[in-house]
Amino acid sequence: MNILILDDEAETRNRIARLLSREGNVYQGGNGSEGLEIIDNHDIDLILTDICMPVMDGLELIRTLRGRDDDVEIIVMSGYSDFDYAQRAIRYGVMDYLLKPISPVDLLNLVKKASKQREKLEYSKQFGMQPFLNALFNGDYGRREAEEKMDLLSMDTNFDYCLSGYARLKGKAENGIEMERLSRLIPEYASKGMKVYVFQRGRSAALFITVKDITRTYIEKTLKEFSLNASASPELETSGDFLWMGFSSPAFSVTDLREKDREADTLRRTTLFDSHFECCLPVPSADRSKILEETDMLSDRILSIVISDIEPIRFVSEYFRHLSYTARMYDYPTAEDRIAVLLGRLIRISEKNIISDKHLRIEADIRECRKLGNLYDTAQSLIGIIKHIQEEYRRENIPLSDVLTGTIRRRVQENIANESFSIQDAIKGLNYSENYIRYIFTNSEGMTIKEYITSERMKHASALLEEGKAVKDVAESSGFSNQRYFAKCFKDFFGMTPTEYRESKTSK
């Protein structure tokens, strides 16, 4: 360590220099100006400076160094007991303040403390927290070595439990772009007794968490509060981002973090963002073969709708919910194997049914989908691929009139009870002008879209009345909140009131 002693009394400087000669290389100066010259020519680690010196006093020197953003450690020495000097020096970030005559024991203790802090700073600059935490999560350190490096990085080593975790913003790719934001935001919401360190692990935002003075029983509750508080931060509310965090079960020692990281990483890979918070708990016992059977049945159902105009989101979402449960019951590769089989069958469907060379683009998308390392991104990609196949198949194999009218008919059937459902809802996203779609539909069905909506609602209502349902209930399930208006529309369509119609059908 390089130490600089600044004092206008040569005898004082020499006495301190002799005392510190074993602690490192010692330089001397009689005032702040001489000190700056020495600092410019040598890599000084610690400065011991008097306050009152000619030419440039100690406070002016400290102001100059802090203005240059110099992070050198500084200990102030003075024969003046006026606390104003100490306060002014502390505002400039000095390490400590000693009154003359200086106690050799106090001075040596402070110098050793400064040496330790300098060692920590240099280690942190040279190696940083991220490579250490990645190595720790890989299981590269024993407990003693890990704690020594944690101390050098000024990390807390006095804790009861530690955990692994991951954080992610829904809809954002795991590519490190959000790391700066998450590393700044998340630690702000750590609960009392928790320390949270955010670092980049691969393409993901990983969390190393230490817990103190919180019983194991309440750790999950504390983590949940932490997660919900962070997800409700004003910054995230303003941007509309959904923050998810998943945590491993607690460990007693950092040497267990490799295993705990596997737990948390499974949550990261299998989350479908059903909640802001997930914690690794034992998976409830279940019939494993039944879970796999149901998952495979859902895979077949997805493949059955690829060459159709049926919206795939509902089926894909259900399939991936089963995959999430499968992965947590078995392991992630088990889920990956089933995804690979499904994607392989999609390639064969694309080759068989997409006549043009556009199936090559679909195959490229499927290959990229195989590379995704978590269920959420894979599900979103799969939905896009299926819609692409459906679109190309319709374009090449199904007459446009059938596509348009079939889509409108299906949407009407799905929204019979939705009073707010309109013509605009029926034709939304069909990529043709409204007048053209109306023309195609009327020419194909022999009635306008509005007439078709009314007709289907009346047919639905009549079927319910034939079962003896109450008029009020029939009205609501047919898209009418106003019973009187429903009765008028029904009479206009059938020539009798709903009550008369029900009696005529149920009295037979």
Image (tube, rainbow, N blue to C red):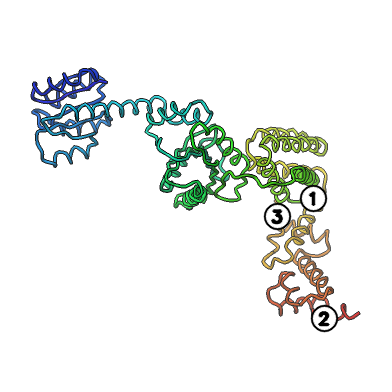
Let me know if residue 306 appears in the view. Answer: no
Q: In this view, does 197 lie to the left or right of 369?
A: left
Residue topped by disc 3 = 433
Three-letter amino acid code at disc 2? Met
Q: Is residue 366 left or right of residue 77?
A: right
Q: Quadrant of residue 374?
A: top right
Residue at 55%, 32% (x, y): give it: 258
How many other residues sit within 10 Å of disc 2, few (<14), some (14-19) or many (≥20)?
A: some
Three-letter amino acid code at disc 1? Leu
- C-beta proximity under 8 Å, tags 1 and 2: no
Q: In which quarter of the image is the N terminus?
A: top left
Residue 303 at what x, y percent from top left? Answer: 79, 43
Mark 3 and mark 1: Cα distance apart in space: 13 Å
Q: Is label 1 in a helix, a strand or a loop?
A: helix
Let me know if residue 375 appears in the view. Answer: yes
Residue 120 at what x, y percent from top left? Answer: 35, 28
Residue 68 at what x, y percent from top left? Answer: 25, 30
Q: In which quarter of the image is residue 106?
A: top left
How many other residues sit within 10 Å of disc 3, few (<14), some (14-19) or many (≥20)?
A: few
Q: Earlier in the sequence, mark 1 or mark 2?
A: 1
Instruction: Spot the residue most to the right.
Output: 508
Q: Is label 3 in a helix, a strand or a loop?
A: loop
The image's mark for residue 185 is: none
Residue at 75%, 57% (x, y): give it: 437
Q: How many marks?
A: 3
Residue topped by disc 2 = 496
Q: Quadrant of the C terminus?
A: bottom right
Residue topped by disc 1 = 400
Residue at 12%, 29% (x, y): give it: 56
- C-beta proximity under 8 Å, tags 3 and 2: no
Mark 1 and mark 2: Cα distance apart in space: 38 Å
